[in-house]
């Protein structure tokens, strides 16, 4: 059977083609009765709007472009999952590309999407890439995410990385830990730098020495840092890793070395990716509800697209406040001591960490 077209829907609903178009595109006034008749006709005929024709008539593609620094890992998977849920609910499709943290590749991705999408969501931890996205996109609506700081005169969503890091250290202090090491993210990454700054501030406020081990937001870099920690003569009693994947890597290295989490070393991560609740012990972390953040970002961009020529522009910076999610990896030090088993390597009180960096 030949697929139904918009004229078939109009005849069945006994309305004009223009009325059907207004109902399907959500553009222009229609009565509730007309809307109901059109929707019933669409269902009865199993009518599927032709996206190409709709694009020509509305100058919209019903497609959103998403540019990420990477496509690998649970964080980006969760983010896209949330965006996809919102896109489907709003009748949009997604085109996803990666910049691989490279300005030239970001430029190529943005240029390839112009004319194919109604708006762009650009997640970049680098200011230069964020500026590049806005300049290359032209009049295309762009929502910036996770740049680490609010972008003036541009709609953006940022995570309070500094505040989250402070809360992570405060939590470890509350559990009785005092020798807290930080596994940082890559240099030049705004999120990494903000989390490092939060760690340094919280430790300085507590009057405690600091120690920072370089990481790269990867499990391998977390494992390398965990191995270093396990070999220290004056071992830290807690680790705050700049993301969950590094924290998991550190946990594996510590356990392989015969150390127990949290009895010997407590661990806190950042992001609350799904694996944080699957490892044992469960990982305490700073959660930002990644999928919900992605959903909110897409819904906001669609609102910006639909109101582009109506009213004041949305140029606000929305801040996502991380929430502490406490799991077994940070049991109180007193509890850890009471459950310490004979033969386990004990933590001895010291005045400073090996290799400390006084701040």
Image: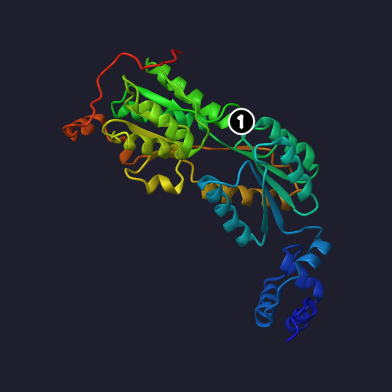
Q: Is residue 141 above or below residue 173?
A: below
Question: Is residue 243 at all visible to an observer of this figure?
Answer: no
Q: In the rendered view, does 235 fall on the left or right side of 112?
A: left
How many badges with numbers are in the image? 1
> Which residue ends up furthest to the right in the rendered image?
56
Asked where in the image residue 103 lies, by quadrant, the reply is: top right
The answer to whether 326 is drawn above or below residue 208 in the figure is: below
- Tell which of 84 and 310 is nearer to you: 84
Residue 9 point in image, percent of width and height: 75, 79
Question: Does residue 4 appear in the picture of this structure?
Answer: yes
In the image shown, does 81 or 70 lie closer to the viewer? 70
- Residue 343 in which image quadrant: top left
Q: Is residue 121 left or right of residue 309?
A: left
Pointer 1 residue? 149
What kind of colouring is applied to the model shown?
rainbow
The picture places residue 243, in percent across and down from the top left corner, at 47, 36
Q: Residue at x 59, y 29 (%)?
A: 190
Query: Is 312 rendered above or below residue 29?
Result: above
Query: Which quarter of the rendering shows the N terminus?
Result: bottom right
Quadrant housing residue 55: bottom right
Residue occupying the point 76% across, 70% down: 50
**Secondary element at tag 1:** loop
206 on left or right of 115:
left
Q: How would you rate the neighbour count of disc 1 (Cα within 10 Å): few for under 14, some for 14-19, many for 20 or more?
A: many
Q: Position of residue 220 (x, y in %)?
A: 47, 37
Q: Position of residue 121 (x, y in %)?
A: 67, 46
Left or right: where does residue 142 sit relative to residue 253?
Answer: right
Q: Nearer the viewer, residue 275 or 332?
A: 275
- At 80% from the left edge and 61% from the top edge, which residue is drawn? 58
């Amino acid at each position: 059977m030949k697929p139904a077209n918009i004229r078939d829907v109009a005849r069945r609903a006994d309305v004009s083609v223009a009325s059907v178009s207004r109902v399907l595109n959500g553009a222009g006034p229609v009565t509730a009765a007309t809307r109901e008749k059109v929707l019933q006709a669409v269902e009865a005929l199993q009518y599927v709007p032709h996206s190409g024709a709709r694009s020509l008539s509305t100058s919209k593609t019903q497609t959103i472009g998403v540019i990420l620094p990477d496509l690998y890992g649970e964080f980006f998977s969760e983010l896209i999952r949330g965006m996809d849920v919102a896109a489907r609910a709003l009748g949009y499709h997604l085109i996803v590309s990666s910049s691989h943290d490279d300005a030239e590749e970001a430029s190529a991705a943005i240029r390839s999407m112009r004319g194919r999408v109604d708006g762009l969501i650009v997640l970049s931890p680098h200011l230069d890439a964020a500026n590049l996205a806005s300049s290359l996109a032209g009049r295309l609506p762009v929502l910036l995410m996770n740049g680490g700081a609010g972008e003036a005169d541009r709609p953006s969503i940022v995570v309070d990385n500094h505040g989250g890091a402070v809360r992570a250290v405060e939590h470890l202090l509350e559990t009785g830990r005092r020798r807290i090491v930080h596994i940082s993210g890559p240099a030049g990454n705004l999120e990494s730098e903000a989390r490092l700054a939060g760690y340094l501030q919280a430790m300085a406020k507590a009057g405690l020495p600091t120690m920072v081990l370089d990481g790269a937001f990867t499990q391998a870099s977390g494992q390398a840092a965990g191995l270093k920690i396990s070999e220290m003569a004056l071992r830290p009693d807690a680790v705050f890793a700049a993301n969950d994947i590094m924290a998991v890597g550190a946990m594996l290295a510590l356990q392989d070395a015969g150390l127990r989490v949290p009895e010997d070393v407590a661990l806190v991560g950042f992001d609350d990716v799904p694996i944080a609740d699957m490892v044992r012990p469960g990982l305490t972390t700073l959660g930002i509800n990644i999928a919900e953040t992605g959903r909110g970002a897409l819904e906001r961009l669609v609102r910006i697209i639909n109101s582009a020529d109506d009213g004041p522009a949305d140029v606000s910076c929305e801040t996502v406040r991380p929430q502490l999610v406490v799991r077994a990896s940070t049991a109180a030090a007193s509890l850890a001591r009471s459950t310490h088993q004979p033969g386990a390597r004990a933590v001895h009180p010291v005045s400073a960490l090996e290799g400390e960096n006084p701040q």
